[in-house]
Image (cartoon, grey):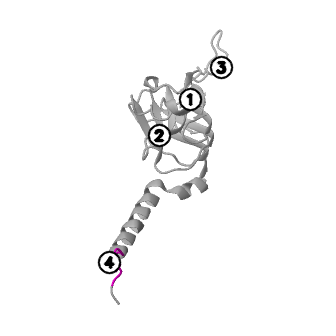
């Protein structure tokens, strides 16, 4: 029995199937759709600093007008420098962002009560871009100055992201949950100075 004219040969069919399976594998790796159903919750406490605040030692003999030891010259805990509420972009996102100055002078971006979708290659970015609502705000955060504070630790919860040494927080006005793989913001917050 001869081959039916117009029907592909077995090696062609096998070749097409191999290419199709490879493309599906690459697509699954690239998009990671299973992450849409996987939540990672991370609950971190407010950052603590091991350096104690400086204080002036009280004299051993009371002097006129002295009322005891001097108060610490710096606050005992983190100070909120700026804060804002996350708005949704590519994915529904909510929570609060706080820029904190610790007693040692370092800064931390804290995400509180974060709730967003999981996704491939999510980062926390400190940026100078204005936060725009709707589709207009999805792709603006890599247009100007930005600093990646690292991979998103979890798509839910409260987390801390230290600013690298030498980064001046005054140069930035917003925070984005940024998908580095697809260059899109999942959500962002405008930072209002305290």
Nearer to me, 163 or 83: 83
Is 114 left or right of 153, judged from the image as shown?
right
Q: Which numbered disc covers residue 68?
A: 3
Q: Picture quarter containing residue 61?
A: top right
Front position among marks 3 and 1: 1
Badge 2 is on which residue? 184
Tell me which label, 3 or 2, sits earlier in the chain.
Answer: 3
Name the residue at 53% across, 27% down.
132
Front position among marks 2 and 4: 4
Dominant SS type (magenta): loop
**CA gap, disc 2 and disc 4:** 41 Å
- Residue 32 appears at what percent x and percent y? 49, 56
Query: What is the magenta range?
Result: 3-11
Inspect this view and state whether residue 23 appears.
yes
Tell me which label, 4 or 1, sits earlier in the chain.
Answer: 4
Q: Secondary structure at mark 4?
A: helix
For mark 1, does the 10 Å Cα neighbourhood hold few (<14), some (14 to 19), or many (20 or more) residues? Answer: few
Q: Which numbered disc covers residue 103?
A: none
Q: Secondary structure at mark 1?
A: loop
Is 156 left or right of 107, judged from the image as shown?
right
Front position among marks 3 and 2: 2
Name the residue at 46% across, 60% down.
28
Q: Secondary structure at mark 3?
A: loop
- Residue 3 appears at what percent x and percent y? 33, 83
**CA gap, disc 3 and disc 4:** 92 Å
Badge 1 is on which residue? 133
Q: Which numbered disc covers residue 11?
A: 4
Tell me which label, 3 or 4, sits earlier in the chain.
Answer: 4
Nearer to me, 172 or 7: 7
For mark 3, does the 10 Å Cα neighbourhood hold few (<14), some (14 to 19), or many (20 or more) residues? Answer: few
């Amino acid at each position: 029995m001869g081959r039916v004219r117009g029907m592909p040969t077995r090696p062609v069919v096998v070749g097409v199937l191999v290419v199709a399976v490879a493309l599906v594998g690459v697509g699954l790796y690239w998009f990671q759709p299973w992450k849409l159903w996987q939540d990672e919750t991370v609950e971190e406490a407010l950052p603590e600093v091991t350096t104690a605040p400086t204080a002036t030692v009280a004299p051993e003999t009371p002097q006129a007008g002295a009322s005891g030891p001097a108060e610490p010259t710096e606050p005992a805990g983190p100070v909120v420098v700026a804060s804002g509420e996350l708005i949704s972009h590519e994915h529904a996102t909510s929570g609060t962002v706080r820029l904190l100055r610790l007693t040692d002078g370092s800064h931390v971006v804290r995400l509180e009560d974060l709730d967003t979708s999981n996704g491939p290659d999510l980062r926390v970015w400190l940026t100078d871009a204005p936060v725009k609502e709707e589709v207009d705000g999805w792709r603006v955060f890599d247009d100007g100055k930005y600093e990646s504070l690292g991979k998103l630790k979890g798509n839910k919860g409260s987390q801390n992201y230290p600013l690298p040494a030498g980064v001046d927080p005054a140069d930035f006005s917003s925070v984005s949950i940024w998908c580095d793989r697809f260059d899109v913001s999942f959500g962002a917050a405008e930072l209002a100075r305290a």
